[in-house]
Image (cartoon, helix red, strand yellow):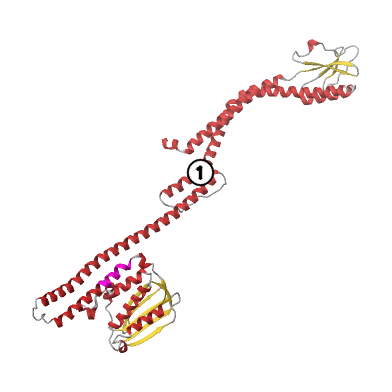
């Protein structure tokens, strides 16, 4: 019961009921107090108006016209006028025929008239007449009495009417607010799917419409926030992956540099103290230089890797003619002693234009084509194609070689991972080529694939 009393519907019903009941009781009290007086004044005004008509009829000096006017006076005012001549004879009573004879004339004196009767003098045809009439005061008093007697029934009627009006009024008024409250509760639960029906253009309808707009705005803002949050999570996760990749890269670099550096230091120290057979400087100095050269190349590639994720490096995009750039890289490869031993097959469409960092895409082409030359036999076929596709373009390098185990293909993109397990840098490389290639493609938004095909492998990238 306490919870019910706290509800707006209860408060509104109670307030409406009390106002309706008070309003009807005040109206009824006004009727009791003022209706008799108003009715009396109304009757007096009607009598005065009708008297004016009687006076006008008397001016015609026609007694028949005067009597007809008195009939209308009786009908309009519900009073009985009596017309008496100066001798006290009754000349006229409405709808009563007066027959006076010489022996028994109808005569009325002042004592025969109601004490409350009004007396007016009327002159007609140069003769004065007295007009007697009395207002029906009893009817006016009866109105007040009847109103008082009817008061209990009217009170009961007023209570029932007030209850019905307050119930339906509060129900009609509170229902839209209840629907708004239900939608608002769903909005608290971040559910914006249910919308309010707008049935009017008043304040309630405007509030419903604004609540729908607010739900739409909140849903849109929440969706954008979730999208931004997911994007932020992806960026954070990507940053973590990059950070972990950097850590792994630093550890791998440390390991890769440690062994050749220790080897060079051992060679130089042995040559410094002329320890046989390293006292043969002519033989071991070139060997030391070769190791240092490999280390320099490794350090240079490490520097390139460190620049890949820099914004200024990523944003340096230009329109690059992929067809001409591929031809330029192949021209450099022609000086390779094994170039003419390969079965080269070129399928390069002219003027394939792309948006990319020129240095990055050139490095990608050098690595991919270089791997095709390095990891294929002398008489192997190498196919290089640059072609347009239905949506954009595609670059592919295929070379004949032994198939790569499927479980190893994913590992080839890890830094310093080599399929050739001997550790020989000449035959196995340093394990950074594919890693750098794929990173350069990823930061520029290009897709790529590396898979086994019939009698060989193919590396493809596209947009």
Report x, y in % for residue 339. Answer: 31, 87
Q: Nearer the viewer, residue 426 or 227?
A: 426
Instruction: Judge left or right: residue 281 versus residue 35.
Output: left
In percent of width and height, residue 14 lies at 50, 34
Q: Quadrant of the N terminus?
A: top left
Q: Viewed as shown, does residue 219 lie left or right of 437? A: right
Residue 67 falls in which quadrant of the image? top right
**Which residue is pictured at 31% across the width and 62% down the height?**
239
Task: Please state if 272 lies on the left or on the right of 137 as rendered.
Answer: left
Main secondary structure along the magenta-highlighted residues: helix
Residue at the spot x=16%, y=79% of the render?
285
Sort mark 1 into few (<14), some (14-19) or many (20+) by Cα contacts within 10 Å: few
Locate residue 132, reporting x and y percent. 80, 17
> From where the camera sits, is residue 214 visible?
yes
Q: Nearer the viewer, residue 379 or 184?
A: 379
Range of magenta residues: 299-309
- Residue placed under numbered mark 1 in the picture: 175
Quadrant position of residue 31: top right
Q: Foreground residue, 51 or 372?
A: 372
Residue 186 on the magenta span: no
Give above or below for 456 relative to 28: below
Question: Which of 231 and 171 lies nearest the eye of the viewer?
Answer: 231
């Amino acid at each position: 019961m306490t919870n019910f009393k706290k509800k707006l519907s209860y408060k509104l019903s109670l307030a409406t009921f009390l106002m309706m009941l008070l309003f009807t009781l005040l109206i009824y009290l006004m009727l009791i107090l003022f209706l008799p007086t108003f009715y009396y004044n109304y009757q007096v005004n009607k009598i005065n108006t009708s008297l004016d008509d009687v006076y006008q009829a008397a001016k015609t000096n026609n007694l028949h016209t005067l009597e007809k006017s008195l009939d209308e006076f009786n009908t309009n005012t519900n009073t009985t006028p009596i017309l008496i001549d100066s001798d006290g004879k009754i000349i006229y009573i409405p709808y009563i025929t007066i027959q006076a004879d010489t022996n028994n004339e109808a005569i009325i004196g002042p004592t025969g008239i109601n004490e409350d009767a009004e007396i007016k003098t009327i002159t007609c045809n140069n003769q004065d007449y007295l007009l007697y009439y009395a207002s029906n005061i009893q009817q006016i008093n009866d109105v007040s009495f009847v109103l008082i007697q009817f008061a209990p029934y009217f009170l009961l009627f007023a209570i029932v009417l007030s209850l019905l009006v307050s119930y339906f009024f509060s129900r009609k008024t509170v229902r839209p607010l209840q629907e708004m409250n239900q939608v608002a509760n769903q909005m608290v639960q971040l559910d914006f799917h249910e919308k309010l029906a707008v049935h009017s253009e008043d304040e309630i309808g405007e509030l419903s419409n604004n609540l729908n707009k607010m739900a739409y705005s909140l849903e849109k803002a929440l969706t954008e926030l979730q999208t931004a949050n997911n994007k932020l999570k992806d960026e954070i996760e990507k940053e973590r992956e990059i950070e972990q990749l950097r850590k792994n890269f630093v550890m791998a670099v440390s390991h890769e540099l440690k062994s050749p550096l220790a080897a060079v230091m051992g060679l130089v120290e042995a040559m410094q103290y002329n320890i046989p057979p390293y006292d043969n400087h002519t033989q071991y100095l070139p060997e030391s230089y070769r190791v240092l050269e490999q280390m320099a190349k490794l350090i240079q590639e490490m520097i390139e890797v460190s620049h890949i994720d820099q914004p200024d490096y990523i944003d340096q995009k230009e329109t690059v003619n992929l067809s001409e750039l591929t031809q330029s890289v192949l021209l450099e490869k022609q000086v390779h002693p094994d170039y003419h031993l390969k079965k080269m097959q070129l399928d390069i469409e002219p003027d394939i234009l792309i948006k990319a960092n020129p240095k990055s895409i050139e490095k990608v082409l050098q690595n991919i084509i270089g791997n095709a030359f390095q990891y294929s036999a002398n008489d192997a076929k190498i196919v290089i194609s640059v072609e347009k596709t239905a949506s954009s373009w595609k670059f592919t390098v295929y070379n004949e070689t032994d198939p790569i185990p499927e479980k190893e293909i994913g590992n080839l993109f890890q830094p310093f991972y080599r399929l050739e397990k001997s550790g020989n840098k000449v035959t196995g490389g340093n394990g950074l080529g594919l890693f750098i290639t794929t990173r350069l493609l990823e930061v520029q938004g290009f897709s790529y694939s590396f898979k086994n095909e019939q009698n060989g492998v193919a590396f493809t990238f596209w947009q």
